[in-house]
Amino acid sequence: MTSPAKPGDARFFQRTGPHSLSSMAALIGAELIGADKQIQAVAPLQTAGPEDVSFLDNRRYANELAATKAGAVILHPDFAAKCPPGTAAIVTPEPYVGWAKISALFHPPRPAHAGIHPSAVVDPAANIGPDVEISAGAVIGARAEIGAGTIIGPLAVIGEGVVIGQHCRIHAHATISHAILGNRVVIYPGARIGQDGFGFAITKTGFVPVPQLGRVLIGDGAEIGANTCIDRGSAQDTVIATGAHIDNLVQIGHNVQIGSHAVVVAQAGISGSTSIGPGAMIGGQAGFIGHLTIGAGAKVGAQSGVMRDVPAGMEIMGYPAQPAKRFFREQAILRRLSAEKKAGKASPTE
């Protein structure tokens, strides 16, 4: 094993810079305390040097601030006075947001390298916009539309009639059918979008498939994680709204509606016709029966089993899911009863 490397290995990430501290502070609307200077890279507190910028967001790592050798640290006003000598402070109430923006300043996503690889298969009836990159082995179906500056990764399959907006990134082995994507959408490797929903009628002799006649609509800036599956709608559309972020290995059934800037974490399963409101947060491995309404800003804990509607802003968890305060109260009661029972068995007077 080699010693820990700084982020942004040049073999995998392009880098810009240097950038001045004053320009970084202006970028994120922060106050610069200390001398302005040029910074070469971003790095964590533990490994940052005088030419690096780092950040502190979690109070658990506050002790590492005193020992850092970073040239500057993005941090909350509460920690501004604790920067060591020679380390400038970039002060903002949202240090992690600042870190995200400054990291992207040094390491922006690479632009599309316009062109179609010789091994790609592009139907003559497809409409390919300017500056589109189509990688090795990709397949673009008839009447598909690919917007300007979009990257289609190796072995990705874009089905007939699919519309993909501008500056999207469709990673390797993703397949997309029956779908319309907005601008700046990111589809990670192996995602499956637009396949038949799990719909069938039950008869005495077996199952009769129900035609799935809807689409998948994905809004601007949404991201769909690796190996996630999103079924197209049955009679209406499955909708992933603007800015929604779906993690890896998520199953989204037909007709599901996911609101703007909602978050769904890995291995969650959302059954058909469930509506998840804007800004909701769904924990890993949570499961939902169909036809539910999850209100805006609701939070669903990991591994929860959701069987009822959830009001806006409510936090729930458990199986079956219930309000988080009630869940923790019941857990505390169970622990106390268990401890009392063990103590009673150990008593010589019992």
Image (cartoon, rainbow, N blue to C red):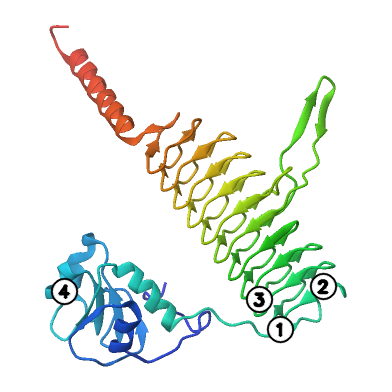
From the top left corner, tell me how far across and down residue 136 is, in percent. Answer: 75, 76
Alpha-carbon span between mark 4 and mark 3: 41 Å
- Residue type pointed to by label 3: Thr
53 or 264, which lies in front?
264
Quadrant for the N terminus in the image:
bottom left
Alpha-carbon span between mark 3 and mark 2: 14 Å
- Residue type pointed to by label 4: Ala
Q: Which residue is mark 4?
A: 80
Mark linked to residue 130: 1
| Depicted 108 relative to depicted 211: above or below | below
Disc 2 secondary structure class = loop
Q: Earlier in the sequence, mark 4 or mark 3?
A: 4
Q: Which residue is mark 2?
A: 126
Residue found farthest to the top: 350
Disc 1 secondary structure class = loop
Disc 3 secondary structure class = loop
Determine which quarter of the picture holds residue 142: bottom right
Q: Are marks 1 and 4 in contact (CB under 8 Å)?
A: no
Q: Are marks 3 and 2 in contact (CB under 8 Å)?
A: no
